[in-house]
Image: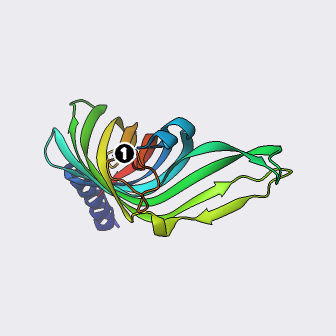
Amino acid sequence: MKKLSTFLFLFVISSMVFAQESKIAIGFQMANSITSLRGNSFINEHYDSRFVISPGITFDYTINERFSFNSGLAFERKGAKTDVEFTDGIGTPIGKAEVKANYDYLTLPLLVSYHTNGKLRFYFGGGTFFGFLLSQKGITEGNDVIPEQTWDNTENTKRIDVGLAFKAGINLPMSDILMIDLGLRDHLGLLNTSKVEVFEDGSIKTNAFSAFVGLKYKL
């Protein structure tokens, strides 16, 4: 029994030391995002930003005391919304409905972050992101007069989105192996996502500005 207790004690101590020296941390993150579309005068004038929630997993590798590499994989919904007025066959208004444009992506960010010293470590970083399109749909919300409508526009949307990624936040340690991650991020799309040249004066580009909270575990 004494040998078993000694072994368990040494195992716990060695695990704590390894966790403190570990360079890898994985975690889960939830982001509340303000998403928008831009790129042509029609979208800029008629579409507004909207709130969505995006979950994901995170991966961090400590390069040294000051710098780390950050990545992960997230389900990210981007898009915008607008109000459309409907009329009957003779042009009489019959009501308004909200129309949402949903761009659903699997997003892979690649960033390098700079960290401050101290128990509470602030950080900021930048890099790029790659988004793989799962679907692009339009949804018209229904009301008493107009039924809900959904149409699929995935085939007219490019599968890959690439842009700039920025991130800033703070790591709050809970133990030697667990920490809470709080911060802000921005995924600014740079590519035209549309395959169809509908607008003569521009393209359709995405953006998602997010406040996030995450839990990280040191391996």
Report which residue position mark 1 lands on: 187
The residue positioned 32% from the left and 67% from the top of the image is: 4
The image shows residue 19 at horizontal and vertical percentages of 26, 53
Residue 43 left/right relative to 82:
left
User: Relative to the observer, which residue lies in front, 184 or 14?
Assistant: 184
- Whether residue 47 is situated above or below residue 136 in the rendered picture: above
Q: How many marks?
A: 1
Measured as percent of width and height from the top left, residue 27 is found at 38, 54
Residue 31: tell me if it is visible. Answer: yes
Determine whether, in the image, residue 189 is placed left or right of residue 126.
Answer: right
Going by the picture, which residue comes out furthest to the bottom? 155
Question: With 116 as the anchor, is 26 left or right in this view?
Answer: right
The x and y percentages for residue 36 are 48, 42
Of residues 203 and 138, the one drawn nearer to the viewer in this rendering:
203
Question: Which residue corresponds to the image point at 32% horizontal and 39% vertical from the top-left?
Answer: 167
> x, y (%) of residue 180?
40, 42
Which residue sits at x=44%, y=56%? Answer: 56
Query: Please, is residue 180 above or below residue 73 in the view?
Result: above
Query: Secondary structure under badge 1?
Result: strand
Relative to 39, say whether 132 is above or below.
below
Q: What residue is at 61 percent from the left and 50 percent from the top?
A: 100
Q: Tell me which amino acid carries mark 1.
A: His
Image quarter where the C terminus lies is: bottom left
| Residue 59 in view here | no
